[in-house]
Amino acid sequence: MRQLLNSWPGNPAFVQGRFLDVLAANPLMTALSPMYTPGHNILRAAFLDSAVSDLFCDAEAPLKNVVSALRASVGPDVEDPQLAELIIGELSLKSPDFRRLWSRHDVRPHAGGGVHRMQHPQVGELELHYDKFHLAGADRQMLTVYQAQPGSRSEQALTLLATIASDQQHRSAGRTHNADTDATS
């Protein structure tokens, strides 16, 4: 899956688990928002990280979507200890918005697609279409791929962000290489 994600350098893409943990992401997805770094939880970031709410032009809609998608993803497993720790142990205590949306009991699978409007701090406004795909043979894992309308301002901004991400990745790799060389000298 990582190889597939990395074969889309111009399309932000990531895989999430059933509790909305980021399992894998390509560099452009991580450049779009650090919340998409493998190991992070999208739900936790959406409600507790102000940079995430600043990213989305209409923050309420993605919040509603992520809560209803979580309910759909966990299904009858609401007693799962990992879910209880995330929901009861953290989000319910720290986020009034989460408590409000969770208490609505909305359930809507997150498969399909839509549009996210974002205000990225480096490249400005983005309107990205996304598609979500359930991964066969994986326990409720989902692949999400974003794309900009061809020829649009968003496509230009996404291309610029891909360049920035690639430059940062090369500089980071160069620092690692230099540190390894210094250590063996």
Image (cartoon, rainbow, N blue to C red):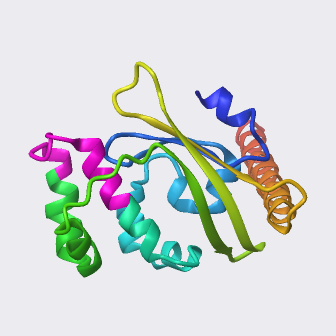
Residue 48 sits above or below residue 67 on the image: below
Left or right of 174? Residue 67 is left
Instruction: Please state the horizontal and vertical placement of residue 177, each as a whole percent of the image.
Output: 77, 42
Q: Which residues are magenta?
A: 66-83
Q: State the residue at coordinates (25%, 51%).
A: 71
Indicate whether residue 67 is drawn in magenta: yes
Instruction: Please state the horizontal and vertical placement of residue 141, each as a whole percent of the image.
Output: 41, 34
Give whichever of 30, 185 is nearer the camera.
30
Q: State the residue at coordinates (20%, 73%).
A: 99
Which quarter shows the N terminus? Answer: top right
Left or right of 178? Residue 140 is left
Choose top left, top right, bottom left or bottom right for residue 80.
Answer: top left
Q: State the residue at coordinates (22%, 76%).
A: 100
Give whichever of 21, 176 is nearer the camera.
21
Which quarter shows the C terminus? Answer: top right
Question: Magenta part mainly helix, strand or loop?
Answer: helix
Numbered marks: total:
0
Toward the top, the furthest residue is: 137
Instruction: Please state the horizontal and vertical placement of residue 24, each as a whole percent of the image.
Output: 53, 39
Toward the right, the furthest residue is: 151
Give whichever of 164, 129 is nearer the camera.
129
Instruction: Please state the horizontal and vertical placement of residue 115, each as a whole percent of the image.
Output: 61, 60
Residue 170 sits above or below residue 141 on the image: below
Q: State the residue at coordinates (57%, 55%).
A: 114
Choose top left, top right, bottom left or bottom right for residue 102.
Answer: bottom left
Indicate whether residue 145 is drawn in magenta: no
Residue 21 sits above or below residue 159 on the image: above
